[in-house]
Amino acid sequence: MLATLLVSVLVITLIAIVLALLMVIADATVGNYGTAKITINGSKELEVQGGQPLLKALNGEGIFIPSACGGRGSCGLCKVAVLEGGGNYLPTELPWISEEEKKNQIRLSCQFKVKNDIAIKIPEELFSVRQFTTKVESLRDLTHDIKEVKLKLVEPTEIDMKAGQFIQFQVPEYELTDEPVYRAYSMASVPSDITHIELEIRLVPNGICTTYVHKHLKEGDTVIVNGPYGEFFLRDSERDIICIAGGSGMAPVKSILLDMADKGSKRKARYFFGARSARDLFLIDEMRELETRMENFKFIPALSEPSPEDKWEGEVGLITDVVGRLTENASESEAYLCGSPGMIDACIKVLRDLGMPDERIYYDKFS
C-alpha cells in the first residue's frame, strides 16, 4: 500500500514538473517573436522587438502617437492604419473601432501587438512631434483639487504649438506605477511663449499621474513630455465664438483666448465656465483682465450648487441651461467645448437646438 502511494506521488510530481517545463518552453518560444519590421507610410522602416504593443514600439523609436489614457485602451485616441500584417481584431479594440474604420484597417495601437512584419500609415505631422526635457519652474494651487504646473523647456528649448493642443506627460516609477507611464494634458500656455508649457491638472483619486503631480512633484524636478498633439484649436474665420468648459477644461480655452488677445482679435467671443460652488472657480481675475484686453470678449461663470456662504450673484444652474438661456441663435457661430464627456454631449445638444451645425462644434473630451 505504501509503495503504491509513493509511486502515485512520484508520478504526479513528474507530471507537474513536465507541465512546468512545457510552460517555460512555450513562454520562451510562443511568446518570443524575435524582431519585426514596421514600414511607415511606404517609406520609413523600423526594426523593433516583437510581441510589444504598437504604441510602445513606436514610442521607443521616437514616434509618438497621441494617447490620452497612457495606453490603457480607455480613450480610443491612438488609432493607426495597419495596412499589412494586422490579423484579427482584439475584443479590447472593438468598442473603439467603427465599421467604416474597420474597412480602412484602423487599429488601436495600444492594444495591437507587433508579432510579425507590418505596414502602417500615420499622419505626416506626427513625425514632427518631439520629446522635451523640462524643469518645473513653479507650482500653484488654483483650487482645492486643481494645480497649475509651469514647465521651463530645457532640451529642446522651444516648442511650436497651436492654442488648444495637448502634450503627453511622463510619470516616472513611484508607488502607484512600476514603470514610466504617459497621460495627456491640454496646454494652458499662450503659443507666443515658446520656452514654457503650462498645465492645469485636477486631482483624481488614485490617479497615477494626478497623484504624482499633486503629492510628489516639486519645483526644480525634471519632467519629460512629448507633443504637441490635437485638432482642438481655433479655426481661422470671422464667426462669433462660444466657449464652454468646466474644471480643468479651462486650460485649452484659456490658451485659445490668450492667443486671440495676443493677436489683437476683434472676434466676438463668450466663455461660459461651469462650476459647482465658488471654491471650484479659478482664474477669475485673469479672465476679467482678458475682458479689458478684448472689447468683444465676455466671461460668464456659473455655479450649479452655490452655497449661502458663497454669496454668489452671478449665473446659477447647469452650464447647459445658462448657455441656452443667454444665447438666442447660434447658427452663424462656432463653438469650442472642453470638459467631461457627459458635459460635452449635453452642450452639443443645446448648441444644435440653437441652430449650430455639427461641423462647427469643436470639442476635447477629458476622460
Image (tube, rainbow, N blue to C red):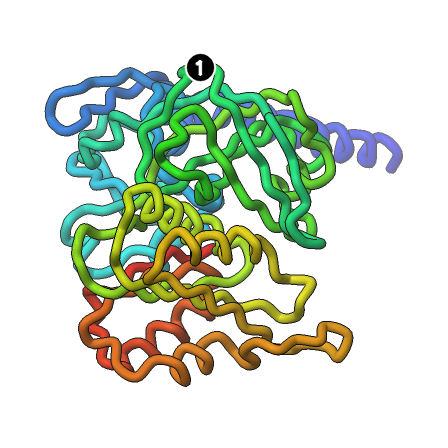
**In the image: residue 303, left or right of residue 326:** right
From this viewpoint, is residue 280 visible?
yes
Q: Residue at x 58, y 67 (%)?
A: 275
**In the image: residue 145, left or right of residue 363:** right
Q: Quadrant of residue 3?
A: top right
Please determine whether, in this image, residue 69 is positioned above or below residue 126: below
Total numbered labels placed on residues in the image = 1
Q: Secondary structure at mark 1?
A: strand
Which quadrant: the N terminus?
top right
Residue closest to the far right: 2
From this viewpoint, is residue 353 visible?
no
Q: Residue at x 35, y 30 (%)?
A: 64
**In the image: residue 283, left or right of residue 50:** right
Front-lying residue, 47 or 322? 322
What amino acid type is highlighted by mark number 1? Glu
- What residue would you read off at disc 1? 155
Q: Residue at x 56, y 33 (%)?
A: 150
Report crowding for label 1: few under 14, some 14 to 19, many 20 or more residues within 10 A (C-alpha). few
Front-lying residue, 348 or 65? 348
Expressed as whole percent of the image width and height from the top left, the position of residue 131 reads 40, 22
Expressed as whole percent of the image width and height from the top left, the position of residue 243 reads 37, 63
Expressed as whole percent of the image width and height from the top left, the position of residue 216 reads 72, 33
Front-lying residue, 74 or 336? 336
Expressed as whole percent of the image width and height from the top left, the position of residue 53 reads 39, 33
Q: Residue at x 66, y 31 (%)?
A: 16
